[in-house]
Amino acid sequence: MPQPVPSAAASTSNDTLISKAKSHLLQNYKQQPIVLVKGRGTRVWDADGREYLDLIGGVATCALGHCHPDLVAAAHAQLDSLWHVSNAFYSQPQIDLAAQLCEWSGFERAFFCNSGAEANEALLKLARKVMKDRGTPERYEVITFERSFHGRTLATVTATGQPKYHAGFEPLPAGFHHVPYGDLEAVRRAVGPATAAILVEPIQGEGGVRLAPEGFLKGLRALCDEKGLLLLVDEIQTGMGRTGIPFGFMREGIRPDAISMAKALGNGLPIGAMLCREDVGASLSPGSHGSTFGGNLVAAAAANAALKVIRQPGFLDEVTAKGAYFLGRLREIQGKLPPGRVVEVRGQGLLVGLEVDREAPQVLGKLREAGVLGNAAGERTVRFAPPFTVTREELDQSLAIIERVLMAL
Ligand SMILES: *Cc1c(COP(=O)(O)O)cnc(C)c1O
């Protein structure tokens, strides 16, 4: 059982706060029944003072752990000088962030927003506008993939290839086609005179941590070149070094036309970005798109500090090494369990999925009670996205708990 840490206890208990939550919060989430009040690195504490190893970090957002000192200092300094000016004016944190992201990613232009869904909206609007500007306004459709996840706004939820997220919200916006992930021939068959772009995740995160087969992104790039389509890559979960390289698309040495990012960009402060090539970026001309809060100064300051840490020489090699160690040890555990209990261990870098033989929340509840936090990706996959700063000791401690919980199922 997790050890109580009295100094971290809130004045109100988990149970009291959760009953208040149930009276007032919209009941649209399936929340785990703890109230988290404090975090440091890989560890968090709940309102009763219980400690947990946080292997999900705000759903892959807190990539440098909770309260990383460099990020806290950067956000504090910004809070003390200027919070927000909107995009009616320039601001230095945003200018610096655009420069850092362009240098790191190889794109020429950055647009800032507040979330993943908004970053994908920017991609979708970009695709339509580029086709209008090229004199082919009949091209507005976007091909996306089954089991993909692109967000919850009407357009991005329609792009999402999971019918359960569509149910009840029809009529959905026109212009989206879903094809099986990894099937290049199916994509080719789906391309028609109305196709404008292909939108793809390098690894399907929410869809169950499913890796694209080797050569898939390269094949999509070639197809887009052949047919005059835009290749849009959703790097919201895979960007910022999560898979051990800056962006997932880089594994195949391709250059997309544009990408979206969010999750780990502000290490938990809300910020999203769309990065694109000069030629397509010109289509979003002055006044054509925007956001009031996009690129907020405090979030941008935290993102600049996060990038500085992640871009240190050798830092991402550590992410690769820790990820390989974690995956290897999980596969060892899989081998010790009754056959079939863990169906598959998948992942890359520190984005890891454990497909189990039952509903993921059942396993997640037992893990939480034993002191390890994860979350579900798809129906039967337990997802872990530990902070890049996780130590071997913390991984070992987590693995011992995971093994014990899976053994006792
Ligand atoms: C989380 C996620 C989104 C949605 O991001 P929000 O910030 O929740 O809008 C979109 N695409 C991918 C791949 C994601 O992982």
Image (tube, helix red, strand yellow):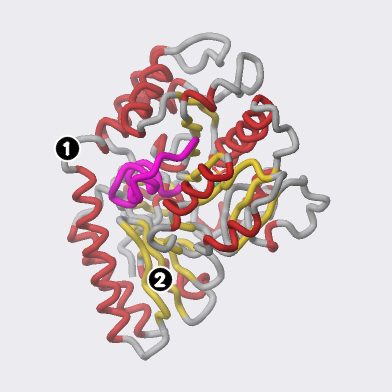
Q: Position of residue 111 (x, y in %)?
A: 51, 25
Q: Position of residue 265 (x, y in %)?
A: 41, 36
Q: Which residue position is annotated with label 1?
A: 313
Instruction: Give the quadrant of the N terminus.
Output: bottom left
- Asked if residue 99 is among those painted magenta in the image, a careful observer would answer no
Of the numbered discs 1 and 2, the one sitting upstream in the chain is 1
The kind of residue on which mark 2 rests is Leu
Magenta segment, principal secondary structure? loop
Q: Does dot 1 land on a helix, a strand or a loop?
A: loop
- Residue most extreme to the front: 226
What range is drawn magenta here? 237-257
Q: Is residue 400 left or right of residue 275?
A: left
- The image shows residue 200, relative to residue 311, as above or below, that is below
Residue in view at x 69 percent, y 27 percent: 135
Foreground residue among 211 and 307: 211
Q: Which residue position is annotated with label 2?
A: 354
- Residue most extreme to the top: 89
